[in-house]
Amino acid sequence: MTQVRSPRQVPRWRDVQPFLRPRPVERDAVRRRLARCLSVDDVERLARRRVPGAVWDYVEGGSDGEIAMRRNREAFDRVELRPTAFEQVAEPDLTASLLGRTAAAPIVLAPTGYTRLSHHTGERAVAAAAEQAGLPYCLSTYATTSITDVARVAPAGRNWFQVYLMKDRAVTGAHIDEARAQGYEALVLTIDTTVTGMKRKDKRNGFDIPPRLSVRTMAGMARHPGWVADILSTEPLTFATFPEGSEHARWGVSNQLREQAIRPTDVAWLRERWNGPVVVKGVQSVVDAVTAVDAGADAIVLSNHGGRQLDRAPVPLELLPEVVEAVGGRAEVYLDSGVRSGGDVVAAVALGATGVMLGRAYLYGLMVGGQRGVSHVLDLLTDEMRRAMGMLGTPTLADLTPAHARIRDR
Ligand SMILES: Cc1cc2nc3c(=O)[nH]c(=O)nc-3n(C[C@H](O)[C@H](O)[C@H](O)COP(=O)(O)O)c2cc1C
């Protein structure tokens, strides 16, 4: 049998030259960093190096044995997306109706307390990125930027405010009044934190909110002089949604100040006092979902707080189908805990969610590149969604059905 051989020649410069196309050097360090991040996992890896260890653990960590946190991710990893290859679409439409208004995608940026620990630009950067992306942003009661200051940087943004109900209802009432005056669109009542989860990493680090300086945390901070300089040279870290100098501003997270038993009547009270859309976040059972909707919630968020509260809590993605069925279209159903990719968002919508909330994913972006980092994460997710929906053959979110996503046993 004859052997096929390519004819050989002496290598010539003019044949090699076309392949030598040096990339332009990116001088902007943030842009250079972000360009290396092709997924939220890449962003997470880089973020870890940007902040002191105790800050990283505060953001990334889960409660107790972190079983719920791990299971949140495992459930998304088990999802199989099922395409109709004959019907692929080039330009899927990601727009979603969230609380009756169009958003660029079915994504809401979740409330995260003490956001300025991740990056000194904190909530302002997140709100600005959300406004730019056409997505709602939910400011936490435990924010390090005030309700008014967030509205100032994102006046056209869809700003929501997350309520931790205070024992002193006048304090919550003041939040509601300020949110209304600043044009906020919705209130989000979090119901899963009447007892505070125990995060072993924070305990070991001696980390507390407000931060307490221990030898260990100071040693960790010494390795991040840029982060320390940024924090020390900008406004002090406070619970900025409360009046300056008040006991709430100093000790806002304390269980002593927060309501410790939330009842359906509290949802109704909020609905009445706010007179606008109310979302109940932290729903973890079919019974609570129906109770919240019966009490007047316009939307619920299935959430185990990203695995930061009750360990071994139900996984929102697994709970979703039965809750959607029980709610029967009477309210929107959102989900969070573990969303890290556009494929995760597509899976959640296919299984019946109106949209998702994003927590750590955008905080990782914030750590890596402030506002630009958050925008990068949102771009990654929406690009991934576009590709997934294109390959699935679903032109719009309404075309996504449970037939497109199956949670595999393994
Ligand atoms: C650092 C951090 C702080 C948080 N603070 C709040 C908060 O103040 N209020 C609240 O309702 N949820 C809070 N959450 C929970 C998020 O809103 C969201 O439920 C959770 O992050 C979703 O899980 P994921 O991080 O896996 O996306 C916080 C989460 C993190 C990571």
Image (tube, helix red, strand yellow):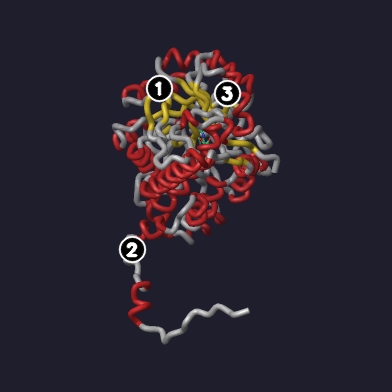
Is 214 or 158 nearer to us in this picture? 158
Mark 3, residue position: 324
Q: Which percent across, then down, holds residue 40?
A: 49, 49
Q: Which of marks 2 and 1 is nearer the N terminus?
A: 2
Quadrant assignment for the N terminus: bottom right
Mark 1, residue position: 100
Mark 2, residue position: 26
Q: Is mark 2 on a helix, strand or loop?
A: loop
In this picture, residue 407 sits left or right of residue 136: right
Q: Is residue 283 above or below residue 16?
A: above
Callout 1: few (<14), some (14-19), or many (20+) C-alpha neighbours within 10 Å? few
Mark 1–mark 3 distance (CA, rounded to whole Å):
18 Å
Q: Which percent across, then down, holds residue 214?
A: 55, 52
**Residue 154 in view, yes or no:** yes
In this picture, residue 219 sits left or right of residue 319: left
Q: Which percent across, then down, holds residue 14?
A: 33, 79
Q: Which residue is drawn at 41% across and 42% down?
A: 90
Q: Is residue 172 above or below residue 112?
A: above
Amino acid type shown at disc 1: Gly
Q: Do the residues labelled 1 and 3 touch (CB within 8 Å)?
A: no
Mark 2–mark 1 distance (CA, rounded to whole Å):
42 Å
Amino acid type shown at disc 2: Glu
Mark 2–mark 3 distance (CA, rounded to whole Å):
47 Å
Q: Is residue 118 above or below residue 131?
A: below
Amino acid type shown at disc 3: Val
Is 245 or 284 nearer to us in this picture? 284
Q: Are marks 2 and 3 in contact (CB under 8 Å)?
A: no
Q: Residue at x 38, y 56 (%)?
A: 229
Report if the beta carbon of the residue with label 1 is closer than 8 angstroms to ligand 1: no
